[in-house]
Image (cartoon, rainbow, N blue to C red):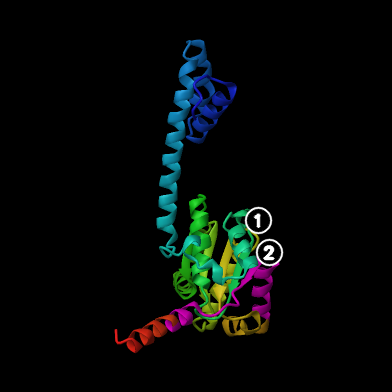
Amino acid sequence: MSATTYTPEIGARIAALLTAFKLPSAAGAMISRFVAGGFDQALPLLCEVLELEKQDRDQRRVDRLRKASKLLPGKTLDTIEQQHLPRPLVVKMRELATGGFLDRGDNVLIFGKPGVGKTHVASAIGHALVQAGRSVLFMPTYRLVQDLLAARRDLALSRALRSLDVYDLLICDDLGYVQQTVDEAEVLFTLMAERYERKSLLITSNLVFSHWDRIFKNPMATAAAIDRLVHHSTILELDVPSYRTELAKKKNQKSDATQSTGG
């Protein structure tokens, strides 16, 4: 803040910052004390210092959230080759990155064949949300299911589910990649039911809904799971060529070109 003259707006900002720092007594008395003592011209400088403190606190919080998120490093919006994605998909992805869906407890479902970048898109959204100060946890679905299954065996499933409530978004990567047993399907369904309309899930899968009976084993459980996920959700379909396949083709083409020139 470059202002050198005290204004009521500066006073309101100082009070807001002190309140955010959990210093309510200082927030209520500091402005009046400074003005009464004839030190009101020092308040703009004080406001600048408090703004620096806020920036530092915000960055430390983001650093803590990013470490706890277990998000894949480097898989951000900036590293996605957006020119290979349909424009409406990019627009929707950036809209999700603002985090409005978290306030409504909505879900995000990302579908696509192996290698099209589902995990990258999910991680990129997660990184953007963490940068905005939202709590995110990224886990391969099979690992999350095994953790919940172990908790159920220890009669601690409710506690394990409550521990996941601290996260605004839970990213379950590659649902359906590994075949589930009946017990695994049950704890996965319990997780979805517990977060329904309260906390958001982001799920990536190479299985369309018509094949989800492979996951939940019976038609009733499959229908119930899909109903809960889709009721409040955004669906992204990555109907694009496999990124890994395209990368391999380019590598092979480069190798062939080198060999043909005797390099």
Indicate the position of residue 39 as horizontal and vertical percent values.
Answer: 46, 14
Q: Residues within 10 Å of mark 2 (few under 14, many from 20)?
A: some
Above or below: residue 191 compared with residue 211: above
C-alpha separation, residue under disc 1 versus residue under disc 2: 8 Å
Q: Looking at the image, which is closer to me, 10 or 229?
A: 10
**Image point 54% across, 23% down: which residue?**
28
Q: How many marks?
A: 2
Q: Are marks 1 and 2 in contact (CB under 8 Å)?
A: yes
Left or right: 197 in relation to 116: right
Left or right: 101 in relation to 187: right
Q: Is residue 149 visible?
A: yes
**Image point 43% across, 81% down: which residue?**
250
Magenta span of residues:
220-249
Indicate the position of residue 30 as horizontal and vertical percent values.
Answer: 49, 21
Task: Say which residue label 1 marks.
Answer: 104
Task: Say which residue label 2 marks.
Answer: 232
Indicate the position of residue 222 as horizontal and vertical percent values.
Answer: 65, 79
Q: Residue furthest left?
A: 263
**Dominant secondary structure of the residues highlighted in magenta in the image:** helix
Residue 231 magenta-highlighted: yes
**Quarter that holds the C terminus:** bottom left
Q: Residues within 10 Å of mark 1 (few under 14, many from 20)?
A: few
The amino acid beneath tag 1 is Arg
Q: Earlier in the sequence, mark 1 or mark 2?
A: 1
Q: Residue furthest front?
A: 261
Helix, strand or loop under label 2: loop
The amino acid beneath tag 2 is His
